[in-house]
Image (cartoon, rainbow, N blue to C red):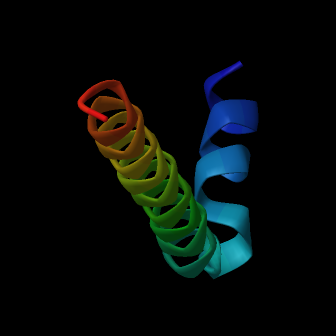
Amino acid sequence: MTEILKNIILMDGNGLFVWFCVIFLLLILALNIFFAHRRKSKIFRSLKNI
């Protein structure tokens, strides 16, 4: 069981690069969602004030 988990994490020596790319992708997606939601909220607030 631990050998399988070790193989999934290390990926024959490429694991650090792959996991860095996955985390970087998730960070970019989270930031895009956050900024889009913030902008949408700002637009709705400005429309309420009209």
Foreground residue, 33 or 3? Answer: 33
* Residue occupying the far front of the picture: 50
31, 44: nearer the viewer: 44
- Residue 6, by quadrant, is top right
Quadrant of the image containing the C terminus: top left
Residue 5 image point, x, y percent: 66, 33
Location of the N terminus (image quadrant): top right
Residue that extends furthest to the top in the rendered view of this protein: 1
Residue at x 51% of width, y 47% of height: 33
Q: Position of residue 24 (x, y in %)?
A: 47, 69
Judge by depth and name the residue closer to the eye, 16 or 40: 40
**Horizontal arrangement in the rendering, residue 15 relative to residue 24 (left or right):** right
Nearest the eye: 21 or 4: 21
Q: How many marks?
A: 0
What residue lies at 60% left-to-right and 50% top-to-bottom? Answer: 9
> Where residue 22 appears, x then y in whole percent?
60, 62
Left or right, 15 with respect to 4, comes to left
Residue at figure coordinates x 57%, y 66% from the top left: 25
The image quadrant of residue 27 is bottom left
39 to the left or right of 36: left
In the image, residue 39 above or below residue 12: above
Task: Locate residue 28, reporting x and y percent.
Answer: 48, 66
Residue sitting at x 46%, y 49%? 30
